Image (cartoon, helix red, strand yellow):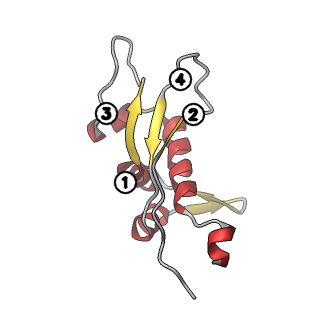
Amino acid sequence: MIRAQGTISPEWITSIYDEDEDKTEWKIGPLNQEQLEEVLFGSGQVAGMVELSPQGIRTALKYGLLDWRGFQDSEKEVPFSRSEFKRIPADIRSELAWKIIGKSRITEEEAKN
């Protein structure tokens, strides 16, 4: 029997690239299956690995990045807003997109049920 995708709660994460003691926290949530398809559309493969397109990364952040804490410029904290997503460094954008995708996929255990 195939079951509908369940509800997965958002979670706060930190980046592997954040070496500061006071780390920036990113709140991510899962994508539904239509959003996941939109993220993966236009992606390519390099050496057998999926490579997200720039549009795929933007789409993952649009749907899956829900908030942040401690994201600052040189003067003050940057308020959470989609218009500020362009200020997130490229490596972090890609990492967040992949973590959002990972949160959106069913586990082997869920697939068995």
Pick whichever of labels 1 and 4 is earlier in the sequence.
Answer: 4
The answer to whether residue 79 is above or below residue 12 is: above
Horizontal side of residue 77 vs 50, given as left or right: left
Residue at image coords 62%, 71%: 110
Pick whichever of labels 2 and 1 is earlier in the sequence.
Answer: 2
**Quarter of the image where one finds residue 56:** bottom left
Pick whichever of labels 2 and 3 is earlier in the sequence.
Answer: 2
> Which quadrant does the C terminus fall into?
bottom right
Kindly identify which residue carries mark 4: 23
Horizontal side of residue 29 vs 78, given as left or right: right
Q: Position of residue 101 (x, y in %)?
A: 53, 56
Kindly identify which residue carries mark 3: 80
Pick whichever of labels 1 and 3 is earlier in the sequence.
Answer: 1
Q: Are marks 4 and 2 in contact (CB under 8 Å)?
A: yes
Kindly identify which residue carries mark 1: 63
Residue at image coords 31%, 33%: 80
Q: Amino acid at mark 1?
A: Tyr
Pick whichever of labels 4 and 2 is earlier in the sequence.
Answer: 2
Mark 4 and mark 3: Cα distance apart in space: 16 Å
Give the number of the disc on residue 15.
Answer: 2
Q: Position of residue 17 (x, y in %)?
A: 60, 29
Q: Secondary structure at mark 4?
A: loop
Residue at image coords 50%, 49%: 97
Residue at image coords 41%, 25%: 71
